[in-house]
């Protein structure tokens, strides 16, 4: 089961995904993003050291590093 969040503003469910992206300099970074459907790259749990917040204007979930 993919990790999901329910938007407080719209009531829509969003699923957490991850993707390994290679930058121009050859460095590889892991990108995390939310999508409306669970597709390829959907993950089952929050990455360690991250928390979910919500954009107050749009209601879209965001992934932030814990302080």
Image (cartoon, rainbow, N blue to C red):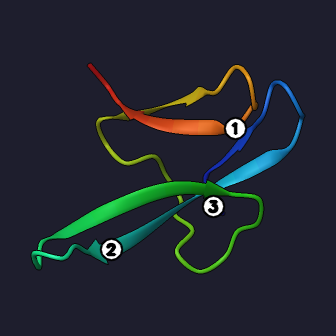
In the rendered view, does 38 fall on the left or right side of 24?
Answer: right
Which secondary structure lies at badge 2?
strand
Q: Which residue is mark 3?
A: 2
Which secondary structure lies at badge 1?
loop
Q: Residue furthest front?
A: 24
Q: Quadrant of the N terminus?
A: bottom right
Location of residue 59 in the rendering, given as x and y in whole percent from the top left corner? 75, 31
The structure residue drawn at horizontal position 12% and vertical position 72%, both measured from the top left corner, is: 27
Q: Nearer the viewer, mark 1 or mark 3?
A: 1
Q: Are marks 1 and 2 in contact (CB under 8 Å)?
A: no
Q: CA distance from mark 1 to mark 3?
A: 17 Å
Q: Which residue is mark 1?
A: 60
Q: Quadrant of residue 9?
A: top right
Q: Which residue is mark 2?
A: 20
Dot 1 or dot 3, earlier in sequence = 3
Please, is residue 47 above or below residue 44 in the view?
above
């Amino acid at each position: 089961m993919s990790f999901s969040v329910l938007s407080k503003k719209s009531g829509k469910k969003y699923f957490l995904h991850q993707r390994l992206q290679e930058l121009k300099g050859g460095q590889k970074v892991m990108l995390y993003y939310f999508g409306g459907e669970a597709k390829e790259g959907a993950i089952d749990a929050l990455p360690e050291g991250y928390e979910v917040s919500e954009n107050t204007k749009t209601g879209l979930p965001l992934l932030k590093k814990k302080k």
